Amino acid sequence: MNQQVLEAKKELVKQIGESISKAGSLTVVSYQGLTVAETQELRRTLEKADSTFTVYKNTLVRRALEEGKHPDLGELLNGANGFVFSTEVSAGPKALVKFARTHEALVLKGGLVEGKVLDAQGIKDVSKLPDKNGLIAMFLSCLNAPITKFAATVKAIADKAPAAQPAAN
């Protein structure tokens, strides 16, 4: 093999490895049957979700996983695959599941989420998780609930109690 080609492949494996390490989730999809326009629409949809759709040779992804000491994706890396790297764990899978509802040619195969290999159903389950802002809102409402209940209780007691009468001199 030509030395330049070998160096280019090594650099590409390094880039793939960095993308895997930075990503909250990696989803493997089969995109065969999508038109060019549909693929562009998928890329735009994923871009809004802070995710990227790329196509790599399975052997290069497998090598990047090995070098980064990530779990092997095994049978997921068979056939023509697209790889979706998402910075937020659920953002990419959520966008993919929504897109796949209207485009039957896009098939979720599985992926890697926080170091664990998931099948297609696992990726669908991850897509149902709230995003970062949703989790923050849930946390804040948990913090706010006791204070709100306390304030409502104090107000109810104040409304129920008769007003104090000034003492007659």
Image: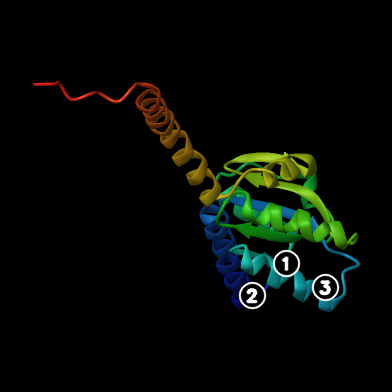
**Circle 2 crowding by C-alpha within 10 Å: few under 14, some 14–19, many from 20:** few
Above or below 65: residue 119: above
Q: Residue at x 47, y 34 (%)?
A: 142
Left or right: residue 25 versus residue 77 is: left
Mark 3 or mark 1, which is nearer to you? Answer: 3
> What residue did someone put label 3 on?
38
Disc 2 to disc 1, how far (Cα)?
18 Å
Residue 121 locus on image (x, y percent): 79, 40
Tag 1 or tag 2, which sits nearer the N-term? Answer: 2
Residue 63 locus on image (x, y percent): 64, 54
Residue 100 locus on image (x, y percent): 83, 58
Left or right: residue 63 versus residue 144 is: right
Residue 144 locus on image (x, y percent): 42, 36
67 and 142: which is toward the camera? 142
Q: Secondary structure at mark 3?
A: helix
Looking at the rendered structure, which numbered label has been put on residue 33?
A: none
> What residue did someone put label 1 on?
55
Q: Residue at x 60, y 57 (%)?
A: 86
For badge 1, the amino acid type reads Val
Question: In what quadrant of the picture does the N terminus appear?
Answer: bottom right
For badge 2, the amino acid type reads Val
Looking at the rendered structure, which numbered label has been put on residue 5?
A: 2
Q: Secondary structure at mark 2?
A: helix
Above or below 109: residue 125: above
Disc 3 to disc 1, how far (Cα)?
15 Å
91 and 12: which is toward the camera? 91
Mark 2 or mark 1, which is nearer to you? Answer: 1
